């Protein structure tokens, strides 16, 4: 038992020291960024990533560094990664929009049906953790209200506990649903950014197949399928084709 306690204590200490080191490194990176030392800042931020730490703020800061270095493609990649972790962040959305204005391809997306647009907008207001926390709190409160319904002898309190408990229970279910949706979005690796200056989209996974259209670096694509070293992709306007897997990097 003592060995288990010692091992657990050492593990906690290691995690604590690692978190402290990362905080110090991020502080140094932030200062380097403020001082205009973008290469140094990037190296420090990437060091934190290599240590296994990730967050929306970290990806956002890396995106800002790349933007200052005029590497708009990499900036878009990291802004997109930040957006996955913090979908409702207005600063991320704004900087991503600005970075997208710097790339060659301006693709008009297919208009979404209003209810799908509303649902997507609602789920992305908060992160998966926030929705899950709200769901847990709502569920606990609904149980407390259910207890009031069972225990109380006052008719008014019983009715209030019953109806509020039912409403909170339904709201909790929706919160868990939104949390799961955002979790899937974060874990979903089907989106990617083109990193080749130009790439010709083919009709099939073959260099000799028909040329369909050309895309440029920085364009976001959805990965539909993979055959060998080829990805089948879909862009925002619905066009579909194939490109070499080496020309993209997953978000």
Image (cartoon, rainbow, N blue to C red):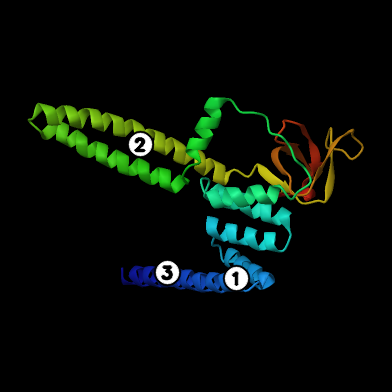
Give SS at disc 1: helix
Mark closest to the chain's N terminus, 3 or 2 = 3
Badge number at residue 172: 2
Q: Determine the residue positioned at 69% across, 63% down.
A: 68
Q: Quadrant of the N terminus?
A: bottom left
Give SS at disc 2: helix
Residue holding disc 1: 34
Give SS at disc 3: helix
Comparing labels 3 and 1, the label whose residue is closer to the camera:
1
Within 10 Å of disc 2 (Cα), the crowding (few <14, some 14-19, many 20+) is many
Q: Could you tell me how far apart the alpha carbons at marks 3 and 2 are, in whole angstroms? A: 35 Å
Q: Could you tell me how far apart the alpha carbons at marks 1 and 2 are, in whole angstroms? A: 42 Å
Q: Position of residue 130 (x, y in %)?
A: 42, 47
Residue holding disc 3: 11
Q: Could you tell me how far apart the alpha carbons at marks 3 and 1 are, in whole angstroms? A: 35 Å
Mark closest to the chain's N terminus, 1 or 2 = 1
Q: Determine the residue positioned at 53% across, 48% down.
A: 90
Q: Nearer the viewer, residue 41 or 97?
A: 97
């Amino acid at each position: 038992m003592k060995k288990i306690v010692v091992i657990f204590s050492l593990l906690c200490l290691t995690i604590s020291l690692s978190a402290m080191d990362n905080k110090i490194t991020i502080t140094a990176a932030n200062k380097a960024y403020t001082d205009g030392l973008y290469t140094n800042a990037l190296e420090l931020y990437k060091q934190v990533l290599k240590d296994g730490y990730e967050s929306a703020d970290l990806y956002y800061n890396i995106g800002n560094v790349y933007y200052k270095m005029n590497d708009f493609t990499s900036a878009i990649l990291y802004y997109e990664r930040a957006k996955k972790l913090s979908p409702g962040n207005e600063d991320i959305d704004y900087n991503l929009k600005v970075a997208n204005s710097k790339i060659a391809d301006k693709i008009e997306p297919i208009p979404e049906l209003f209810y799908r647009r509303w649902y997507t907008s609602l789920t992305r207001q908060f992160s998966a953790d926030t929705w899950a926390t709200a769901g847990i709190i709502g569920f606990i409160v609904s149980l407390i209200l259910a207890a009031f319904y069972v225990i109380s002898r006052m008719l008014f309190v019983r009715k209030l506990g019953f109806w509020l408990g039912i409403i909170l229970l339904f709201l909790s279910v929706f919160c868990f649903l939104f949390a799961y949706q955002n979790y899937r979005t974060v874990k979903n690796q089907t989106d990617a950014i083109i990193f080749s200056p130009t790439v010709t989209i083919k009709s099939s996974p073959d260099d000799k197949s028909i040329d369909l259209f050309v895309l440029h670096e920085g364009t976001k694509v959805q990965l539909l399928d993979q055959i060998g070293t080829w990805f089948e992709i879909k862009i925002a306007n619905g066009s579909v084709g194939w490109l070499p897997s080496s020309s993209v990097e997953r978000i």
